[in-house]
Image: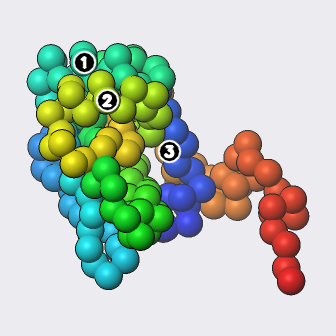
Amino acid sequence: VDTLTTITSKRDERNYALEHPIPEDTVERILDAGRLAGSARNRQLWRFVVAESQEARASLAQTVFVASNVLDAGLVITIATPADAGPANKNMILDAGRAAQNMMLAAWNEGIVSCPNGIPDTEGASAALRLLSDEQPLLVISFAYPKHPRDPQSRTAAAWSRQADRKTLETIVERV
């Protein structure tokens, strides 16, 4: 699939096919896509924490906005960053977002959907994941095969774009 079609057809999804586990080689490709994201001065101020045990998942699920996103997922990755990166903080957040997007696009290339999860209880998430005392959970991403698969090549990138529930370019772009 070409990159633009991948981007335009990808949607956050929370309806998972629970009976289809994600193969370990696919998990590795998703994690590696995150590792390869660019970062300011190549500092890579992140760590990817995979919640594998039922205990970790159950505890983590209680710290996000929608617990079932974590409980039902085939793969759950948290991006952990330094709690205080000082002046690098703004770049660190941007760079972690780039790593997250890389992982979500790599997953979609494999037919796997994803959903970023907000963390209202960062202290609880830190405890559930046994993060280091100087780390914070920045983002939890759920991955799974979709309950209702979608074929990215069923329409053009332009058709996917038209169908997207997004503001128009005219409303968000200003040229000065």
Q: Quadrant of the N terminus?
A: bottom left
Q: Position of residue 43 (x, y in %)?
A: 26, 74
Q: Residue at x 18, y 23 (%)?
A: 56
Amino acid under label 3? Answer: Asp
Q: CA distance from mark 3 to mark 1?
A: 34 Å
* Residue nearest the observer in this picture, 45 or 145: 45
> Which numbered disc, 3 or 1, marks the residue closer to the eye?
1
- The tag earlier along the polypeptide, 2 or 1, is 1
Q: Which mark is residue 123?
A: 2
Q: Quadrant of the C terminus?
A: bottom right
| Residue highlighted by disc 3 | 151
Amino acid under label 2? Answer: Glu
Note whether 21 is above or below 27 in the view shown: above
Q: Residues within 10 Å of mark 3 (few under 14, many from 20)?
A: few
Secondary structure, mark 3, is loop
* Residue nearest the observer in this picture, 105 or 63: 63
Q: Which mark is residue 127?
A: none
